Image (spheres, rainbow, N blue to C red):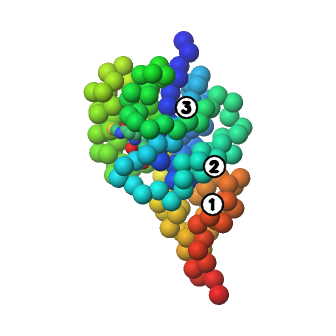
Amino acid sequence: MNKTVICPGSFDPVTLGHLDVITRASRMFDHVIVAVLVNSSKTPSFSIDERIELLKETTRALDNIEIVSFNGLLAEYCRQRRVDAIVKGLRAVSDFEYEFQMALTNKKLNPQLETIFLTADSDSMYLSSSMVREVASMGGDISNFVPSCIHNKIVERLNKGINKN
Ligand code: PNS
């Protein structure tokens, strides 16, 4: 049976951890929608268009990926698009409560919708977009944290020249 899943997130910016989860989802399911969404508790550094562009470059080699953005509820979008499940990465126990709360809320809003958690790869367990932003904005090396094809774009955008003479 044809299965469509969605990988939602802020992706501000996309990291190697996100790419790992998206790649694994693309191997497991027929169609993967990557949704760049507004998290009302975060103030983003990259615009939605910039985040979409970075994701497009990052996922170019995967042929069953669609990148979207929309305003509104994830659960409602999933109903409209007949999405079978939300796929998210779990890095550590600290992620669990937040992710569990979202999964249960989405399930209440759309009882057909499952949430599947993939355990983060051991190389990217510690990674987060906020760490990438902080390290890059202070001139640190982010080459182990973000896909190489978008490394320079992120550095140019975030490096404010701290630590430079
Ligand atoms: O990468 P993030 O910031 O942890 O992702 C959170 C995100 C964007 C998936 C979540 O905030 C979301 O689903 N936003 C869309 C609006 C919505 O449906 N909110 C209720 C979620 S329980």
Q: Which three-letter amino acid code belongs to the residue tagged 1?
A: Ile
Question: Which is nearer the N-term, disc 2 or disc 3?
Answer: 3
Q: Which residue is mark 2?
A: 54
Q: Residues within 10 Å of mark 2 (few under 14, many from 20)?
A: many
Question: Which is nearer the N-term, disc 3 or disc 1?
Answer: 3
Q: Which residue is mark 3?
A: 33
Q: Which three-letter amino acid code belongs to the residue tagged 3?
A: Ile
Q: Is residue 72 left or right of residue 64?
A: left
Return the residue found at the far bottom: 165
Q: Is residue 57 left or right of residue 133?
A: right
Q: Is residue 66 visible?
A: yes
Q: Position of residue 112 (x, y in %)?
A: 36, 19
Q: Position of residue 161 (x, y in %)?
A: 61, 78
Residue name at image x 50 percent, y 31 percent: 6
Ligand 1 falls in which quarter? top left
Q: Quadrant of the C terminus?
A: bottom right
State the residue in front, 155 or 21. Answer: 155
Q: Residues within 10 Å of mark 3 (few under 14, many from 20)?
A: many
Q: Is residue 84 visible?
A: no
Q: Is residue 7 left or right of residue 30?
A: left
Q: Which three-letter amino acid code belongs to the residue tagged 2?
A: Leu
Return the residue found at the far front: 71
State the residue in front, 40 or 92. Answer: 40
Q: Quadrant of the N terminus?
A: top right
Cβ of disc 3 within 8 Å of ligand 1? Answer: no
Q: Is residue 151 left or right of residue 82?
A: right
- Residue 57 sits in quarter: top right
Q: Which residue is mark 1?
A: 154
Cβ of disc 2 within 8 Å of ligand 1? Answer: no
Which type of secondary structure does the marked residue at label 2 adopt? Answer: helix
Q: Is residue 128 above or below residue 136?
A: above
